[in-house]
Image: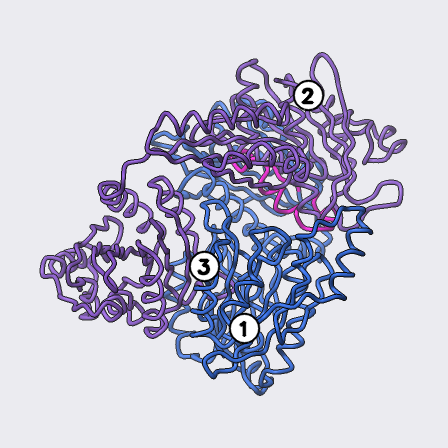
Chain colours: A purple, B blue
């Protein structure tokens, strides 16, 4: 079954706003074995809208229209579908009553125009929308002799997604051939993208029945394996087999592997810290709080994360992490020695089991021939030892900071593993 | 002139990846007075691709195809355009030589298949691509008796965007009626979205010749005003007039207003700190480093930002910001008093002109009836005074942290203004 998702709204044809609902719907549709073959974005012009609907009916079995169901003059989806399919619209009296009741409950006026939200396509059934005034519509119809399913759903994400989940998915499942989806997600840290490709492509390419997606971002690679089969066991066996081979190939770059979702690197670090009943503190220069921010984004992180110091100035390196001014004078603030002193110092100052110290040049200025932009030292100290890694990250300020943060968290993971 | 942007690639029909080039191209096209009327996303299937190209030729004057120009079997854009328009493809010998030279320079093998990147549509001119092996193509042709402009450009953002900018824009400008775009961007902090709408809609709605876009995110509102006219002065006069009225209505919520782009809140804060030759340090509990991270994301922030402490545990609040354990005991870690003590303490410890202290409950757990999730105290201390604000932010952990960060930066801005 082929589907087309149509996002309706002129704001999505500006440089500023993008349709994101379709990613959510695609995930749900794929679960049912429905492919998304086309996505279209169109504005609020009636003529354009009719053109887009007819085009979709000509090439997809399931056409999902998002948006344009509100009460304003720009909301033309109902009218456009009616015209594209030569159907009439009838005003549903129960829906009219519901709109009046809703307006009364909110103590809002009820302009005549609002009532268009009660217009129902001939042959369609209404889909309740608990989070908004405009219901969705489900139309099982024919176009040029072919059966077509046309869904009208509201555009705001907080209406679209729950409505699709709770109302559309069960109805779709009921009319689809039964099939099971098996899924696995693997994540790896700090493996160069090209190396991951070279390593993994020969492994997953022969698995033509498993859809493998690779997402890479700032030293983090996420692999999603999806297999859809009538037989649940067979689908599971295929993704497990492929996941096993990939896990082996990724060696210790791999940091998490799960069925539905997988843990982020900061979650894994906190998980290991919890297991060992260990705590951590960080002293960050060039990453400017990004490491602390990532760790504390995880609920419950306060159990293992004591805190951190953002030591931008040399004086702060001394005041908060006890780095000796002489050491900074001798080796420079961006040096192996200062990174180590930050890690050791923050551990001692806070009483944490582990101390992490980062110093580097994020750019765009501040680089020299000896110490170019992108040079970062990351040190990790625990009661056994203090180690430091030197990295040269390429890219702009944001990218250098992101890579340094990822590298620092990965260093902790490898020590705790 | 109406355009359609077509993004080609099966990965953009998965739940994981989205076309983002089109936002960039839309901004550029709008500058020329070209509207984007449709955006389509299609996979690598030849039949689907031809369908999409024919549909676009039937409804748009300018059709921009992104992607599918590489050397693999999935790269079918050239062939699909040739078939959709009944054109032949010829292999360009200069381009073949360039591909060989490129492979030699990179010491890469040159498989036969790669040569398809030298195939040129009948009547098209090649568009040089300095960042990749596949050149773009520019085709000025007719379809069903109408003049159509068809552009083939590579998909990778680092190839697509510079190529469009340096090669396509001058060519497009040469064939477009001359027109000027005037632009203004305003930004405001911590004004509730509904209030901004109510305040601004009556002001901008009558300006039908100015396109006003409002983007809101976590306490930050960005307004973009665009006016396109043949007469540059007239366009400028309209956006300036509208911007002036909006600035007045936004009162002191407004924090930046610029011609092309506008400064972020952290840039404004750093600008004011620089003007007053003042410095700042932060002590963050629930924001976990997010304030420091935002400030240090700005190049050169080290001139005014001394550093910060992420004081997650009570012990750290004492060790790094000198908050007395008795005070925490008496009022609780999340209290007006502790926020103040954090602000005063971090200022004294670091010698900064201003100290910022934040403590709150980001959730999802840790809330009580008295102190619910979302309760945040933000204190700002300078040599004159120490003030504290109490806020109840709604939403999940991430949202509470983002709002608290925005509120903290806005407090600094208001003090320095």
**Marks 3/1: CA distance?**
31 Å
Q: Earlier in the sequence, mark 3 or mark 1?
A: 1
Residue at 60% across / 28% down in the picture? Answer: A307
The C terminus of chain B lies in quadrant: bottom right
- Say if labels 2 and 3 share a chain: no
Q: Nearer the viewer, mark 3 or mark 1?
A: 3
Q: Nearer the viewer, mark 2 or mark 3?
A: 3
User: Which region is colored magenta?
Assistant: B281-305
Residue B55, position in %: x, y? 42, 69
Q: Nearer the viewer, mark 2 or mark 1?
A: 1
Q: Chain of mark 3?
A: B
At mark 2, the secondary structure is helix
Q: Which mark is residue B47?
A: 3
Q: Which mark is residue B30?
A: 1
Q: Nearer the viewer, residue B350 or B76?
A: B76
Q: Chain of mark 2?
A: A
Name the side, left or right, on which A66 lies relative to A397.
left
Residue B331 visible: no
- Say if labels 3 and 1 share a chain: yes
Which residue position is annotated with label 2? A347
Q: Is residue B286 magenta?
A: yes
Q: Is residue B191 above or below residue A317?
A: below
Q: Nearer the viewer, residue A363 or A1?
A: A1
**Marks 2/1: CA distance?**
54 Å
């Amino acid at each position: 079954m082929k589907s087309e998702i149509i996002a309706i709204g002129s704001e999505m044809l500006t440089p500023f706003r993008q349709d994101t609902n379709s990613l959510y719907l695609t995930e749900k549709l794929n679960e049912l074995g429905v492919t998304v073959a086309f996505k279209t974005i169109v504005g609020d012009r009636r003529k354009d809208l009719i053109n887009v609907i007819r085009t979709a009916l000509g090439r997809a079995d399931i056409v999902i229209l998002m948006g344009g169901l509100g009460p304003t003059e720009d909301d033309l989806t109902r009218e456009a579908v009616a015209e594209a399919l030569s159907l009439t619209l009838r005003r549903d009296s129960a829906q009219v009553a519901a709109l009046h009741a809703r307006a009364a409950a909110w103590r809002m006026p009820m302009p005549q125009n609002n009532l268009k939200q009660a217009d129902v396509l001939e042959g369609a059934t209404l889909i309740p929308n608990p989070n908004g005034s405009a219901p969705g519509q489900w139309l099982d119809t024919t176009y040029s002799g072919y059966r077509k399913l046309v869904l009208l759903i509201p555009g705001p994400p907080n209406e679209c997604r729950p409505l699709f989940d709770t109302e559309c998915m069960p109805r779709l499942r009921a009319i689809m051939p039964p099939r099971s989806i098996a899924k696995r997600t693997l994540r790896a840290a700090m493996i160069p993208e090209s190396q991951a490709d070279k390593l993994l492509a020969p492994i997953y390419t022969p698995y033509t029945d498993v859809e493998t997606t690779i997402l890479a971002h700032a030293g983090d690679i996420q692999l999603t394996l999806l297999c859809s089969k009538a037989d649940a066991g067979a689908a599971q066996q295929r993704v497990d087999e492929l996941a096993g081979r990939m896990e082996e190939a990724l060696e210790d770059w791999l940091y998490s592997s799960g069925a539905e979702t997988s843990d982020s690197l900061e979650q894994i670090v906190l998980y290991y810290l919890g297991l060992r009943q260990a705590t951590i503190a960080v002293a960050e220069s060039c990453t400017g709080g990004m490491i602390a921010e990532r760790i504390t984004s995880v609920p419950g992180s306060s159990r293992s994360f004591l805190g951190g110091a953002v030591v931008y100035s040399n004086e702060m390196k001394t005041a908060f992490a006890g780095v000796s001014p002489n050491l900074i004078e001798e080796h420079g603030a961006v040096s192996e020695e200062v990174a180590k002193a930050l890690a050791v110092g923050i551990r001692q100052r806070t009483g944490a089991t582990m101390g992490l110290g980062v110093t580097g040049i994020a750019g765009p200025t501040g680089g020299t021939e000896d110490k170019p932009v992108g040079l970062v030292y990351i040190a990790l100290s625990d009661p056994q030892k203090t180690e430091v890694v030197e990295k040269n990250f390429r890219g702009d300020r944001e990218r250098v900071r992101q890579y340094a943060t990822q590298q620092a968290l990965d260093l902790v993971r490898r020590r705790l593993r």
